[in-house]
Image (cartoon, grey):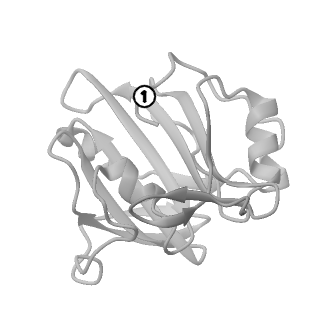
Amino acid sequence: MSSDWTCEAHGPVLPLRTWTRAGPEVLAQAAAHSVVPLWSPLPLPAGWTLTGLAVAGDERSRGRATALALSGPSPLGGPADMVLVAEEMGTGLGGRTAGTSALDPGVEVGAAPDFKVEAAGHPTALWRVESATDRTAFAGEASGVWLWAVLWPPAAELVLLEHLELHDLRHDTHAGLDLPVGAPTARL
């Protein structure tokens, strides 16, 4: 008998908990129980709102992967969604969000980067990685773990040109942060 969560394809996995309404209390609780960053652009791009939160982990392992979902206007018009994932190697939440079966980014990471964002005050390279056709995904390394940015529709990738400054919501300076909340996402 085992208390591990298991997947037929991947064996033991971490349980995934999602919230569609993530106010300040939920963000603070998720941040306090995570061992990986909980990334959020601050300030949010104009017109963007928080639409969901997910944490992979349990009481024993704590949060080994986090995902913050945001929605707003695409630079080319129409609605867009973005999910920022931070995860330890081999967790698979980023690959799942990107729509692939990969646990980690592939060999695409390492050539010339496609975009750069600022994460925790450091320039962070992001490379285009495999994704389902209805979205686009980028991955890189920030704070010693994988950082994924997955965007719907694919043209929404231009949001990454808006000099995003990603902040780790686990830091005390963000305690009680009240991000604008939008309609719940179906992306998590």
- Which residue corresponds to the image point at 28% horizontal and 30% vertical from the top-left? 74
Q: Nearer the viewer, residue 169 or 67?
A: 67
In the picture, which quadrant includes the N terminus? Answer: bottom right
**Residue 6 position in % (x across, y down):** 55, 58
Spot the residue most to the left: 133
Residue underneath mark 1: 71
Q: What amino acid type is highlighted by mark number 1?
A: Ser
Say which of 106 and 140 sits in front.
106
Near mark 1 (Cα within 10 A), the count class, few <14, some 14-19 or many ≥20, is: many
> Image quarter for residue 124?
bottom left
State left or right for residue 84 relative to residue 151: right
- Residue lying furthest top in this view? 183
The residue under the point 18% across, 39% down is 134
In the picture provided, is 53 more to the left or to the right than 127? Answer: right
In the displayed structure, 79 sits above or below 65; it is: above
Q: Residue at x 60, y 21 (%)?
A: 181
Identify the residue shown where x is 60% and y is 73%. 143
